[in-house]
Amino acid sequence: MITLKEIAKQANVSVSTVSRVLNNDQEFSVKPETRQQILAIARENNYQRNYRKKYIINEDQAKKNILILIRIDYEDEIKNPFFSMLRENVENSCVSNNFNYRVIHLENFTKTENDNEIDGVIIIGMVSDQIIENIKETYKNVVIVGHEAKIKNVDSVIPELFDVTINVIDHLLENGSKNIGFMGGKSYIKHKEHSILSIDRRYEAFKFYTKNLKVFDSRNVYITKYGFKYGYEAMNSAIAKGDMPDSFIIGNDTTAIGALKALSDANISVPNQIKIVSYDDTEYARYTNVPLSSVRIHTDEMAKSTIMLMNDRFRGREIGYTLVIPSDLMIRQSSVI
């Protein structure tokens, strides 16, 4: 297995930089491309941190075995770092509770003769109800994080996105916006060999509230995938069409950064000519040329709640719970003149 020192050498950075990136240090300032390079090297060489050595002194304390199934792959984590932060926090929460855990990508998961050794399953990301049902047939204790399951006796932990989107719209209106656009909303639920387009709560809230305020304009809605490329392309389409809205709500930070690049290339000033608010509040939001106002989704609290639900199941609870973790708008330069 590759070491921190070897990763640092390949990435041409210090060992401390590698350590802070792999530990998801949100206060550490590093270029996005450097972070991506470090994560890529670690992933390609199957780097795994030795949490047990650091946190577990008495081997007898590690009584529960947790299987973490990840819906997204590395490329998706780059496009939507919300899920990489969520995975990181779930792993850390497993460690703090003295759980043994294994991380497996959903596509590589097969049931084995060792299934009876698994005490609980945590699924990260959006998967179909049928896949969840199949997993539930084998494993009694299942918690979904980042997606609301509709399966009886399965727990879900999700971020609050509807009400906070209404708060975002109010914020933009209070800061002079008259015509608000939306960009994003295209995500998929994994179902066997294919994916199903998912309804996005951010877009649902945007459409509901702006229609009630009589400021909804379908010409200013750009339903697109998440990622730098898609944000850049969607904003270029809006620029080419002309008669742009004076503000945009964008589905996540990476998509917003692509949109900012398109605006910069077109010499359109943010926030003077157009205001931007995005979601996730990753470190990208704080270090763009124009710091992004962004909705902070508390992945640390989502992870803690996931483990709380799992521990509650170990104590005998069988009815399924859905926990909704509040989100907060972090206001920065991109939405305020």
Image: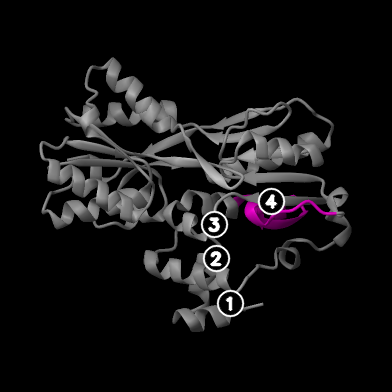
User: Secondary structure under badge 3?
Assistant: loop
Can you tell which quarter of the image residue 214 is in?
Answer: top left
Q: Amino acid at mark 1?
A: Leu
What stretch of residues is rendered in magenta?
89-112
The stretch drawn in magenta includes residue 101: yes
The residue that label 4 is drawn on is 68
From the viewer's perspective, is the residue at label 4 or at label 3 nearer? 3
Decide which of tag 1 and tag 3 comes sooner along the chain. Answer: 1
Contact between labelled residues 3 and 1, with CB atoms less than 8 Å apart: no
Contact between labelled residues 2 and 4, with CB atoms less than 8 Å apart: no
Q: Could you tell me how far apart the alpha carbons at marks 4 and 2 are, in whole angstroms?
A: 18 Å
Q: Amino acid at mark 3?
A: Asp
Q: Amino acid at mark 4?
A: Ile
Please identify the quadrant where the C terminus is shown.
Answer: top left
Labelled disc at residue 82: none
Picture residue at 46% right of the left edge, 79% below the top: 11
From the viewer's perspective, is the residue at label 1 or at label 3 nearer? 3
Q: Could you tell me how far apart the alpha carbons at marks 1 and 4 are, in whole angstroms?
A: 24 Å
In front of the other: 180 or 294: 180
Q: Could you tell me how far apart the alpha carbons at marks 4 and 3 are, in whole angstroms?
A: 13 Å
Can you tell which quarter of the image residue 312 is in?
Answer: top right
Q: Is residue 166 visible?
A: no
The stretch drawn in magenta includes residue 90: yes
